[in-house]
Image (cartoon, rainbow, N blue to C red):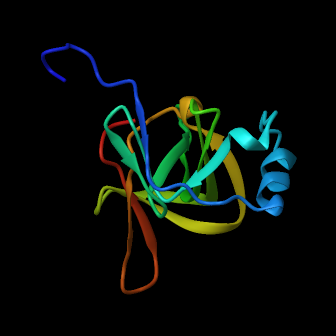
Amino acid sequence: MFLKGTLNNEIEIGPSKFITDIEVEEIKSHNMQIDSIDMLIKSPWIMVKGTKYKPKMVLALNIQENELPKFCIIEQIFLYNNKYVIFKCSELETIMFDEHIFSYEVKVENSYQFVYHHMLPSFIPNNINILPNGYKYVTLRSSI
């Protein structure tokens, strides 16, 4: 990779799984551009340019200056047309930034959305930690 001077553009994908009609309709109902369901596959993990994504990882969805970032947890991973990575994510509400533990306090919302990988403001997945008191915190792996 270093000899080439660039990152690998290929997408590596785990073992494919069948997609139900309910999942297809769910994806289409969220305004995702799916022309042919034959080109849509589901996988337990995917690697894009050397970064591996799996369910339960946290992604940054929205980074606005002077506002708290918006996060989501990956629930399912799809690949469309061997080119477009789509994540089904549970949305997280960001409560506050805790300077003591340098993490964002979040809580899980009862909603989800579908997100294209190439539309993410940051491609680096983050960590979520649950403290003994039940509070959830997202710790960033890099600055956003």
Relative to 135, is 31 on the left or the right? Answer: right
Outermost residue toward the front in this view: 38
Q: Position of residue 106 (x, y in %)?
A: 52, 64
Residue located 36% across and 57% down the image: 103
Q: Position of residue 20 (x, y in %)?
A: 76, 62
Relative to 37, is 90 on the left or the right? Answer: left
Residue located 42% across and 65% down the image: 137
Residue located 74% across and 42% down the image: 38
Q: Quadrant of residue 98?
A: bottom left
Q: Position of residue 7 (x, y in %)?
A: 29, 23
Q: Is residue 143 above or below residue 70?
A: above
Q: Position of residue 51 (x, y in %)?
A: 34, 41
Residue located 38% across and 41% down the image: 124
Q: Nearer the viewer, residue 93 or 15?
A: 15
Q: Nearer the viewer, residue 75 or 110?
A: 75
Looking at the rendering, in which quadrant would you find the C terminus? top left
Outermost residue toward the left in this view: 3
Q: Is residue 6 above or below residue 96?
A: above
Q: Nearer the viewer, residue 35 or 104?
A: 35
Relative to 63, is 131 on the left or the right? Answer: left
Looking at the rendering, in which quadrant would you find the N terminus? top left
